[in-house]
Amino acid sequence: MKKFGLIGFPVKGSLSPLLFGAAYQGRYAYDLIEEPDFGSAFRKFIDGYDGVNVTAPFKEEAFRKADIIDPVCRKIGATNLLVKEEGRIHAYNSDYIGIVRSIAGAVLPDAGITSGNIQDAIYGAFGHVPYALVAGCGGAGRAAAI
């Protein structure tokens, strides 16, 4: 059975295991990996997991450990997903698309937003690149800023 988890500190109150279990109906194991330092959490990932979600305060450190970095992830400088593929660690970031889809869904609820047309739809709704105040400078804050 493939094994996944959530790295962060603290994470003991996270709903991620419940959400992961509902989405994948128990086909995979999902654990909380709560460690006060990233090195310990990362070793647990390397030693026993196929992939991990990464949350505060480790998104930037996790980004630096990846062998292959998704372009969006590289632009943000942080990752919230590390996956082992063919012996290498791949970094991805779903914060960005989640934030953009949330904004697009709020502004254009019936527009049929997809990953392919999301930027055009937002620009069309506002008539220009929209401005927003982002409070925070961690990985998710930077994802919102781009």
Image (cartoon, rainbow, N blue to C red):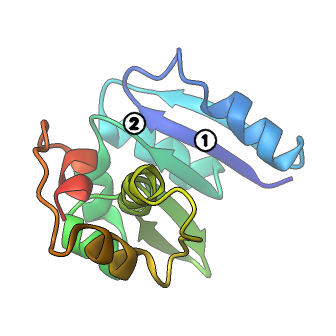
Image side of residue 131 versus residue 31, left or right? left
User: In this picture, is 139 found above or below 71?
Assistant: above
Task: Look at the image and tell me in which quarter the C terminus lies.
Answer: bottom left
Quarter holding residue 73: bottom left
Residue 118, position in %: x, y? 42, 75
Query: Visible in this render: residue 101?
Result: yes
For marks 2 and 1, the one nearer the N-term is 1
Image side of residue 90 versus residue 1, left or right? left
> For mark 1, does the 10 Å Cα neighbourhood hold few (<14), some (14 to 19), or many (20 or more) residues?
many
The residue sitting at 20% across, 64% down in the picture is 77
Residue 139, position in %: x, y? 24, 49
- Residue for badge 2: 40
- Residue for badge 1: 5
User: In this picture, is 48 found above or below 73?
Assistant: above
> In what element is the residue under mark 1?
strand
Residue 142, position in %: x, y? 18, 54
Q: Amino acid at mark 2?
A: Ser
Q: Amino acid at mark 1?
A: Gly
